[in-house]
Amino acid sequence: MATGQKLMRAVRVFEFGGPEVLKLRSDIAVPIPKDHQVLIKVHACGVNPVETYIRSGTYSRKPLLPYTPGSDVAGVIEAVGDNASAFKKGDRVFTSSTISGGYAEYALAADHTVYKLPEKLDFKQGAAIGIPYFTAYRALIHSARVKAGESVLVHGASGGVGLAACQIARAYGLKVLGTAGTEEGQKIVLQNGAHEVFNHREVNYIDKIKKYVGEKGIDVIIEMLANVNLSKDLSLLSHGGRVIVVGSRGTIEINPRDTMAKESSIIGVTLFSSTKEEFQQYAAALQAGMEIGWLKPVIGSQYPLEKVAEAHENIIHGSGATGKMILLL
């Protein structure tokens, strides 16, 4: 290693597997930004379910080992590479994508994936914007093509993506319904844009939703757990309704006939398919949300970097999400 190179603490994954493969090291070289790159001193990093899938080796995208997980960071610009003139040292920023990994004291990012963080949001909130808000925006606006006046059900509304979807849908003039599994979760969903909330742990909650929406059904369902809910979702849709699959943890049996009479659609969404132009478009809309005040991330459990394995365990097996899970540095 070059003498005088700065070292940092970072989480490293040397093999795919359970949460125990996340190793905190303190001998990792601080990356140096190249052309069109910036180095961010990380204050907070969001934890997303997708990071647990990637870590386990079961996800479609496999990083080269060893790697540092994490994409959603918020912090302060530490250094700027050539031609990254939109930023200067000391700027408060957040990003939805890192090059070197976000579970670390410093993270490298391409300048076009980095955005200014307004003063009214703290670093924890900044770390909660990336994947949740960009995914929710893509799901609602790009994939579902929602129109003001339509109804949307956010199935699993109390987590990071769910709350983002509720806030965006409400701001865009939709009738917003949400589901959550705990009393606290339901309360947070109502405080963040939903007109009505249902407890998805109640046996007859689907009947309650049907009764609430009446004959017409629901125009759009944003689905976080398709392997449990997809069949029920199809029964709730309006004519021409669409289910947007944001998350699924396995297989499910459905009856394709349920899509025929209503001419409904099932559409999968992944943020990583977005083009550079689409990211810029989503960022502009979300930046407006921050300025106007409807984009307000809700922070859930917080962990120090040392407890990263516990965070990965809890995001999948916890008792029900309320807000965005964050690592603090």
Image (tube, rainbow, N blue to C red):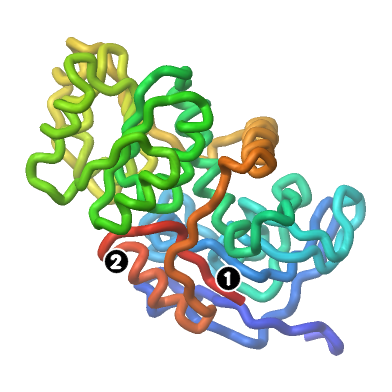
> Which residue type does callout 1 highlight?
Tyr
Residue 93, image quadrant: bottom right
SS class of the residue under badge 1? loop
Left or right: 186 as drawn, with respect to 135: left
Relative to 225, say whether 66 is above or below: below
Quadrant in the picture for the N terminus? bottom right
- Sequence-first tag of 2 and 1: 1
Residue 283 visible, this orientation: no
> Residue 251: image x %, image y %?
21, 44
Residue pointed to by mark 1 = 103
Residue 318 numbered tag: 2
Which residue is rendered at x = 64% and y = 33% of the image? Answer: 285
Which residue is rendered at x = 23% and y = 15% of the image? Answer: 216
Relative to 234, say whether 165 is above or below: below
Q: Nearer the viewer, residue 136 or 109?
A: 136
> Residue 50: image x %, image y %?
43, 55
Q: Nearer the viewer, residue 82 or 209?
A: 209
Is the residue under label 1 in contact with that under label 2 (CB below 8 Å)? no
Residue 241 visible, this orientation: yes
Distance between mark 2 and mark 1 Cα atoms:
20 Å
SS class of the residue under badge 2? loop
> Which residue type does callout 2 highlight?
Gly
The outermost residue toward the left is 203
Which residue is rendered at x = 87% and y = 59% of the image? Answer: 81
Residue 211, image quadrant: top left
Which residue is rendered at x = 30% and y = 37% of the image? Answer: 196
